[in-house]
Image: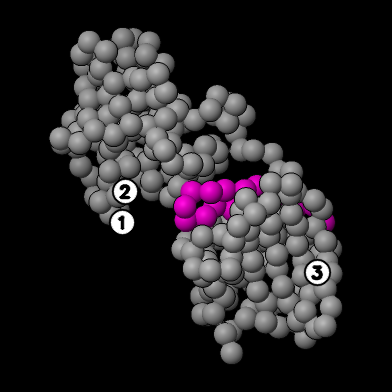
């Protein structure tokens, strides 16, 4: 993962406010790797699968930040030195960046990569507004659900039995169970990192740490206003938490311990 973060740090290093010749290229903004549907939401800059930002002489990559220095115009390209910090280390690299019709092309250490500019409306307006229904509570036969869904097939469901135990959490994005791997739940600026099983869209609660995060997420969701869910493949969805307090109640369900 370290090499990937280093690559994502250094590839889109294109904030050119330090030179009139560079800033005239108009390359400041939000980007995603060409061919990948990463989030373009400004509130997810720097997250794995989130937006890559180039603003005011600073690049925010995946869990790293770079200061862009010594820009040198070269025909239609610009060469510069990027001073980056990631995973506790600092390093410097030379980059050549060329604007393209859809974003930028970056050359470094013999490698060339292309990055696409986020759509104008995404970059300008920020996160996609939530379109989900008000949270509801229902169920039967000893199992109850507190859930919400939108017309894009995005849904989130907390489950609990009638004893207040075996709490579960399920997520679908675009009508499909969330991909296995890391999942980020952001509630009003507080981030809760969890893991999804490989199939079924079920979130793992079967460990002490997992259970503690689940309980904290339940309470934050019940009291919050807005949630953003980001999957390991970069897909994301935004949910209003209107009605979540009534649907979830005042006491968090005890998470499923796997037994």
Q: Residue at x 70, y 64 (%)?
A: 157
- Is the residue under label 2 in contact with that under label 3 (CB below 8 Å)? no
Q: Is residue 20 left or right of residue 215?
A: left
The picture places residue 122, in percent across and down from the top left corner, at: 57, 31
Query: Is 9 positioned to the left or the right of 187 in the image?
Result: left
Q: Secondary structure at mark 1?
A: loop
Looking at the rendered image, the quarter that the C terminus falls into is bottom right
* 232 magenta-colored: yes
Q: Position of residue 185 (x, y in %)?
A: 58, 57
**Quarter of the rendering containing residue 60:** top left
Which residue carries the number 1 mark? 1
The span shown in magenta is 228-243
Front label number (3 vs 1):
1
| Residue at the left extreme of this rendering | 110
Mark closest to the chain's N terminus, 3 or 2 = 2
Contact, mark 1 vs mark 2 (Cβ under 8 Å): yes
Judging by the rendered image, the residue that carries numbered circle 3 is 249
Colouring mode (rainbow / by chain / secondary structure / one colour): one colour
Distance (Cα) linking label 3 and label 2: 40 Å
Q: CA distance from mark 3 to mark 1?
A: 39 Å
Residue 200 at what x, y percent from top left? 58, 68
Is disc 3 placed on a helix, strand or loop? loop
């Amino acid at each position: 993962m370290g090499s990937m973060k280093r690559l994502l740090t250094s590839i889109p290093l294109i904030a050119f406010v330090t030179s009139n010749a560079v800033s005239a290229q108009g390359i400041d903004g939000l980007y995603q790797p060409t061919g990948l549907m990463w989030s373009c939401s400004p509130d997810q800059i720097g997250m794995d699968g989130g937006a890559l930002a180039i603003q005011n002489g600073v690049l925010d990559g995946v869990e790293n930040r770079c200061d862009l220095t010594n820009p040198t115009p070269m025909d239609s390209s610009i060469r510069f030195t990027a001073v980056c910090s990631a995973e506790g280390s600092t390093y410097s690299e030379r980059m050549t960046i060329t604007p393209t019709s859809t974003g930028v092309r970056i050359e470094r250490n013999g490698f060339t990569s292309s990055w696409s500019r986020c759509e104008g409306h995404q970059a300008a307006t920020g996160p996609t507004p939530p379109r989900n229904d008000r949270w509801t509570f229902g169920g039967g036969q000893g199992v109850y659900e507190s859930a919400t869904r939108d017309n894009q097939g995005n849904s989130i469901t907390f489950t609990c039995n009638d004893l207040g135990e075996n709490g579960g959490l399920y997520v679908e994005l675009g009508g499909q169970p969330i991909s296995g791997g890391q999942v980020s739940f952001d509630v009003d600026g507080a981030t809760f990192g969890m893991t999804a099983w490989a199939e079924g869209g079920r979130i793992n609660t079967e460990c002490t740490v997992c259970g503690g995060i689940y309980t904290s997420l339940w309470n934050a969701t019940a009291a919050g206003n807005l949630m953003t869910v980001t999957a390991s493949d970069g897909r994301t969805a935004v949910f209003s938490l209107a009605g979540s307090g009534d649907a979830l109640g005042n006491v968090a369900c005890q998470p499923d311990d796997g037994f």
